[in-house]
Image (cartoon, rainbow, N blue to C red):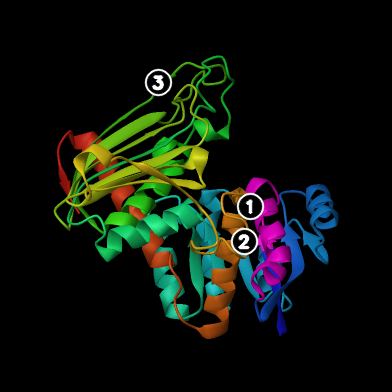
Amino acid sequence: MREIGIGIIGGGYMGKAHSVAMASVGATFGTTLRPRLEMICASTPDSAERYRALYGFARATARWRDLVADPRVEAVVIASPQETHRPIAELAFSLRKPVFCEKPLGASLDDSRAMTEAAEAAGVANMVGFNYIRTPASQHARHLVHSGALGRITWFRGEHTEDFDADPRRPATWRNFGAANGTMGDLAPHMVNAALALMGPITRLCADIATVYADRPGTEGRAPNDDIGHFLCRFANGAMGHLGFSRVSTGRKMGYAYEITGTKGALRFDQEDQNALWLYLAEGPEAERGFRKILAGPAHPDYAAFCQGPGHGTGYQDQIIIEARDFLAAIETGAPVWPRFRDGLDVSRVIAAAQASHQTGGWIDL
């Protein structure tokens, strides 16, 4: 085993998740490359020091450039707002340091394209953080689709719906301004990534996007970004699709859900019940057919590393630990591990096409 110094930029929601993941991935998966929590960066010296002490890092800083350039930081995790992703990644790649970047890859299509070019020019490990598709149940769903168990796929329906902004009395925050922070920039990339992973490339789409609460407290004199959006699409495999996204979907807490229909069967999944996959196979007597609930267990990808009991379940943090395992594998072996920056760029292209379709009111070819 050997150590690798990890630097994490951002100490909040995702900064904590990645810190915990890096601290536990070696014990969970027995990796031969073991992370050393070297440095964490936050917006102020006080918050950086607080995160350092809480998460167990050796050092803290409020200057991300110092973290990236530090020789004891050998790999960088970007868990800061998307507007910061591009300069951090470009500096790290110029120093030939591996980078894991939280989704969305860039704050714009141009940012995502530049970051991908920098990653490929550097020739070092790079990954983008789409964690929800990594649940054991969704990994198994991907296997079922790609193995042909459902036959020829004809239809995909996906949604990412939450209600954290459903109360019109809730004061505006940074999330309510700027295209990168709206529903299409923030929530939609997760389900677009799922659609690409499960179904393959999207060839054309037609989108509609809206702001539901344009006058919530704190928006005076400023134009709030989008609350809700959806699009029809066609996939390269010929299947039709519909994807919807909302942060004002009252009652929905983690509505990352999809349904896939094929000529031999169908499946459905909902992240609010992330350890269950519903599967229908068109076989046997008609009177005995129906969807059956499959509980995740050690027979499914990556489950056994966390728990030996079927149906006991994995959770959100476990998805981040799986990502950490794959990032370390990419660094150690030099082999690309999905999803790379180029896969994040594919998501950005779809989001940009949806925004363009909304502006023109018509179909867009990708």
Helix, strand or loop at label 3? It is: loop
Helix, strand or loop at label 2? It is: helix
The image's mark for residue 214 is none
User: Between residues 186 and 280, which one lies in front from this camera angle?
Assistant: 280
- Left or right of residue 294: residue 327: right
Q: Which stretch appears magenta?
A: 8-30
Q: Which residue is mark 1?
A: 317
Identify the image quadrant of the N terminus. Answer: bottom right
Tell me how far mark 2 sits from mark 1, CA to CA.
6 Å
Tell me how far mark 3 sits from mark 2, CA to CA.
36 Å
Q: Position of residue 127 (x, y in %)?
A: 49, 66
User: Between residues 297 and 137, which one lies in front from this camera angle?
Assistant: 297
Q: Is residue 309 above or below residue 177?
A: below
In this view, the mark in front (3 or 1)? 1
Q: Do labels 3 and 2 touch, CB within 8 Å?
A: no
SS assignment for the magenta stretch, majority = helix
Instruction: Indicate the amino acid at tag 3.
Output: Val
Q: Which residue is mark 3?
A: 212
Instruction: Indicate the amino acid at tag 2.
Output: Ile
Q: Is residue 30 above or below residue 262?
A: below
Q: Position of residue 273 (x, y in %)?
A: 51, 40
In the rendered structure, does residue 171 fall within the stretch colored magenta? no
Q: Do labels 2 and 1 touch, CB within 8 Å?
A: yes
Q: Which residue is mark 2?
A: 321
